[in-house]
């Protein structure tokens, strides 16, 4: 596991990716994203200011199972 605080998981069969955040010693699922816009909205809702700025920063976000910003069905 990386030290990233935000995980954008492996694409599901429908193309969505579960987005979760690691905080307070555990993981919290924020939702199922189908686009970068969804990820940004989830992160804003979780209290992160300027989430667009961290999407490509591996210290913050780990993209699993498919390259960043890709939304293919599994």
Image (cartoon, rainbow, N blue to C red):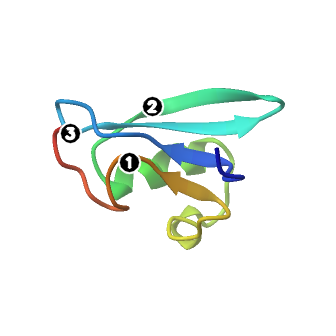
**Label 3 secondary element:** loop
Report which quarter residue 22 is drawn in: top right
Question: Residue 7: x and y, percent?
Answer: 54, 44
Mark 2 or 1 closer to N-term? 2
Q: CA distance from mark 3 to mark 2?
A: 13 Å
Q: Nearer the viewer, mark 1 or mark 3?
A: 3
Position of the N terminus, as image quadrant, is top right
Rendered view: 51 above or below 14: below
Mark 3 or 2 closer to N-term? 3
In the image, what residue occupies the spot 57% across and 72% down? 53
Q: CA distance from mark 2 to mark 1?
A: 9 Å
Q: Badge 3 local density, few (<14 within 10 Å), some, or many (20+)?
A: some
Q: Is residue 72 left or right of residue 55?
A: left
Residue 15's disc number: 3
Residue 55's disc number: none
In the image, what residue occupies the spot 64% across and 42% down? 46
Position of the C terminus, as image quadrant, is top left
Q: Which residue is mark 1?
A: 38
Depth check: 25 or 46 in front?
25
Q: Is residue 25 left or right of residue 31?
A: right
Mark 1 or 3 closer to N-term? 3
Q: What count of labels does the image hold? A: 3
Q: Which residue is mark 2?
A: 31
Q: Are the residues tagged 2 and 1 within 8 Å (C-beta)?
A: yes
Report which quarter residue 16 is drawn in: top left
Rendered view: 34 above or below 29: below
Depth check: 12 or 28 in front?
12
In the image, what residue occupies the spot 37% across and 61% down? 68
Q: CA distance from mark 1 to mark 3?
A: 13 Å
């Amino acid at each position: 596991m990386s030290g990233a605080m935000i995980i954008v998981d492996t694409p599901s069969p429908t193309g969505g990716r579960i987005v979760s955040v690691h905080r307070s010693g555990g993981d919290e699922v924020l939702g199922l994203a189908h686009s970068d816009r969804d990820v940004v909205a989830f992160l804003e809702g979780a209290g992160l200011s300027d989430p667009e700025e961290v999407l490509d920063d591996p210290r913050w976000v780990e993209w699993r199972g498919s390259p960043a910003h890709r939304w293919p069905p599994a």
